[in-house]
Image (spheres, rainbow, N blue to C red):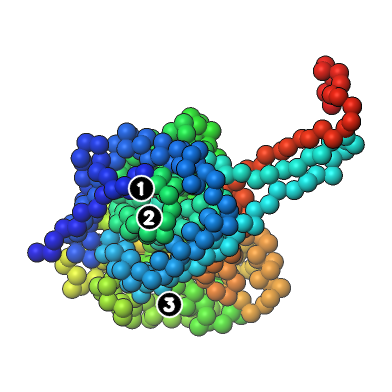
Amino acid sequence: MAEIRSYQMFIDGAWSEAADGALLDSINPATGKVWCRFPAATSSDVDRAVEAAHRAMAVGPWATMTATARGKLLRRLADLLAERADRLAEVETTDTGKLIRETRAQIRYVADYFHYFAGAADKLEGSTLPIDKNDMFVMTVREPIGVVAAIVPWNSQLMLAAVKIGPALAAGNAVVLKASEHGPAPLLELAQLCADAGFPAGVVNVVTGLGDPCGARLTQHPLVARIAFTGGPATARHVVRNSAENFATVTLELGGKSPIVVFDDCDIESAVNGIVAGNFGASGQSCVAGSRVIIQSGVFDEVTARVAERAGRIRIGDPQDAATEMGPLATKAQLDHVEAVLARSLAGGATLMGGGNRPQGFAQGWYFEPTILLCPHPDIASAREELFGPVLSALRFETEADAVRLANDTAYGLAAGIFTRDGARSLRMMRQIRAGIIWINTYRAVSPMAPFGGYGQSGAGREAGFESLLDYSRTKTVWINTGSAPMGDPFAMR
Ligand code: NAD
């Protein structure tokens, strides 16, 4: 039997158990067996991490480090990530079931995110103001905000951590990163890289544990000044309520039910690849899954048939095998959820065009077939609710106006795909669809330069891009009296 690995949390530059010694199990989704254990942080562990971060910002090398020097540390971290990407990928794949071919490529790209933020560190500038008073010189300076609480779910954790801690550290903040209880190992490995890169003690802390108490204490801690949260909308409501305690500013990256709109005049092969990428990439466990596929009548039968044919050829298997195209779902609860929504959808009038079962030959692990549902109307459960699994809901439309109406018929608004050869139409659609990210004739592309975030129930705020750096700093306004006369009447506003 393989040995069960043990992880500790990283607090104030040292490895640490939970105060009460409690541990949680992480299960390998491909086998259904425990592969590592990690601490279940108590409130006092979280307090220790936040206090360490607060201290690091007040005293010690981080407090006085130049922005250029911070950038150099981030660059070193990026290089270490790229060097050790294969080991990290193996850990993430074992911990979450995400395909090795995706984790390897994604972690190398995460290094590029850190390079981007490293370069941005010393580009944050204040300004001088053309003030409307002759005897005053007024300027603004940008300062770090304080302790940042960064909370991530289990999918794409290193990427989701990078878009939080990258800009936070570039702008001079200190971070307490909370890993998901379903697969925290990659972020604990990242903590080691931060130490190896030379970040001073307390600047990056990684805590592990359950949403409550670990996440709950972190989001209401009085010394936390900013919260960057990625997860589901129900948890986000707790986070926002908690932030009423510390008035931290909050960024929310939540779920989605994103549309992929396919017009009659599209390049069919491109659309089919976009639909497969948007629904079966990462086994559909992606916040930007394009799980409402809205297809114009003229190509509906052809597109659904070709997607079903491609889905039928998807290689399901061991996520550690580079040839595998779809691995297991990350947790048993996920699998149960997918099956429950599927059952309600079929009862509500959807027709199964492919998949719909646990695949044969996988007695262990939480595998599910790529599944295609034909939905007669948008109120079918699978067309409304986020499944976070490999289930696609296909809906038919006739006119461009119908397509806009269907695309916007959701409480979410994270992303949308549009497949058409008509450039003007793609721009008309882009303007009318309420979503934070629009992909035209492509799907699931990301970059450190491109802001990422949603509308409505998909959240608030943006990650990545230069504007995210502004969110991790704040403006201080400085007034200097340059007049030769002393300050006058104390009872009149100047
Ligand atoms: P989740 O909301 O259950 O958990 C997310 C994180 O919040 C975990 O670390 C969890 O421990 C923590 N948490 C739980 N309760 C908390 C509390 N009371 N206070 C503070 N933190 C708490 O989400 P999940 O099931 O792990 O992930 C799936 C969800 O994440 C989906 O809805 C998905 O769409 C979303 N997601 C969004 C994006 C995006 O960028 N928009 C990216 C990936 C995933």
State the residue at coordinates (39%, 80%).
Answer: 310
> Quadrant of residue 315 in the image?
bottom left
What type is the residue that disc 3 sits on? Val
Q: Taking 69 as reference, is 394 above or below it?
A: below
Give the residue number, with chain letter if any, for mark 3: 307
Q: Nearer the viewer, residue 118 or 222?
A: 118
Q: Position of residue 19 (x, y in %)?
A: 25, 36
Proximity of marks 1 and 2: CB atoms separated by less than 8 Å:
yes
User: Could you classify mark 1 by the number of other residues whose Cα lies within 10 Å: few (under 14), some (14-19), or many (20 or more)?
Assistant: many
> Disc 3 beta carbon < 8 A from ligand 1?
no
Q: Which mark is residue 13?
A: 1
Q: Where residue 176 appears, x then y in whole percent? A: 42, 45
The image position of residue 321, as x and y in percent, is: 27, 76
Residue named by callout 2 = 195
Query: Could you tell me which quadrant the C terminus lies in?
Result: top right
Labels 1 and 3: the sequence-earlier one: 1
Gap in Å between the C-alphas at discs 1 and 3? Answer: 50 Å
Q: Position of residue 124 (x, y in %)?
A: 65, 53
Left or right: 138 in relation to 290: right
Instruction: Say left or right for 322 vs 485.
Output: left
